[in-house]
């Protein structure tokens, strides 16, 4: 059997935490920030943990060797 390859786009977008959860960049921060509440902009700093159902897809299909 050939080796499973990691999707190169997923390598650039996701990282794993020490406990195995998927860390990702916060969504909705590319443009239009002027009209967003300050509270939303504060909470969207940095990275966030992906939801379980989405993380299962990412780990199974996009990051098989993680």
Image (spheres, rainbow, N blue to C red):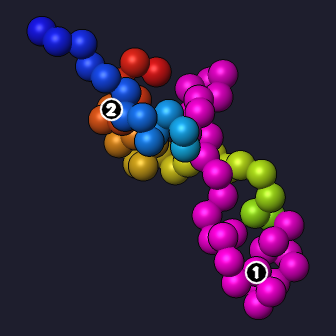
Magenta stretch holds residue 46: no
> Which mark, residue 60?
2
* Residue at screen point 59% across, 33% down: 15
Q: Is residue 59 visible?
A: no
User: Residue 65, located in which quarter of the rendered image?
Assistant: top left
In the image: residue 27, left or right of residue 60: right
Expressed as whole percent of the image width and height from the top left, the position of residue 14 reads 55, 39
Say if 19 sits above or below 60 in the image.
Answer: above
* Residue at screen point 69% across, 69% down: 29
Expressed as whole percent of the image width and height from the top left, the position of residue 44 reads 75, 63
Closer to us: mark 1 or mark 2? 1
User: Residue 4, located in which quarter of the rendered image?
Assistant: top left
Q: Label 2: state its secondary structure.
A: helix
* Residue at screen point 66% across, 70% down: 30
Magenta stretch holds residue 30: yes
In the image: residue 11, left or right of residue 27: left
| Residue on which the image places disc 1 | 33
Expressed as whole percent of the image width and height from the top left, the position of residue 17 reads 64, 28
Say if 49 sits above or below 43 in the image.
Answer: above
**From which residue to which does the magenta span run?**
14-42
User: Residue 21, located in which quarter of the rendered image?
Assistant: top right
* Circle 1 residues within 10 Å: few <14, some 14–19, many ≥20: few
Q: Is residue 13 visible?
A: yes
Q: On the rendered image, what quadrant is the N terminus found in?
A: top left
Find the distance from the CA under tag 1 to the CA under tag 2.
34 Å
Q: Are marks 1 and 2 in contact (CB under 8 Å)?
A: no
Mark before the other along the chain sequence, 1 or 2:
1
Expressed as whole percent of the image width and height from the top left, the position of residue 22 reads 55, 37
């Amino acid at each position: 059997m050939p080796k499973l390859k990691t999707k190169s786009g997923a390598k650039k977008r996701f990282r794993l935490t020490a406990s195995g959860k998927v860390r990702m960049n916060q969504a909705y921060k590319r443009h239009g920030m002027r009209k967003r509440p300050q509270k939303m902009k504060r909470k969207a700093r940095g990275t966030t943990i992906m939801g379980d159902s989405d993380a299962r897809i990412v780990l199974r299909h996009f990051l098989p060797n993680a």
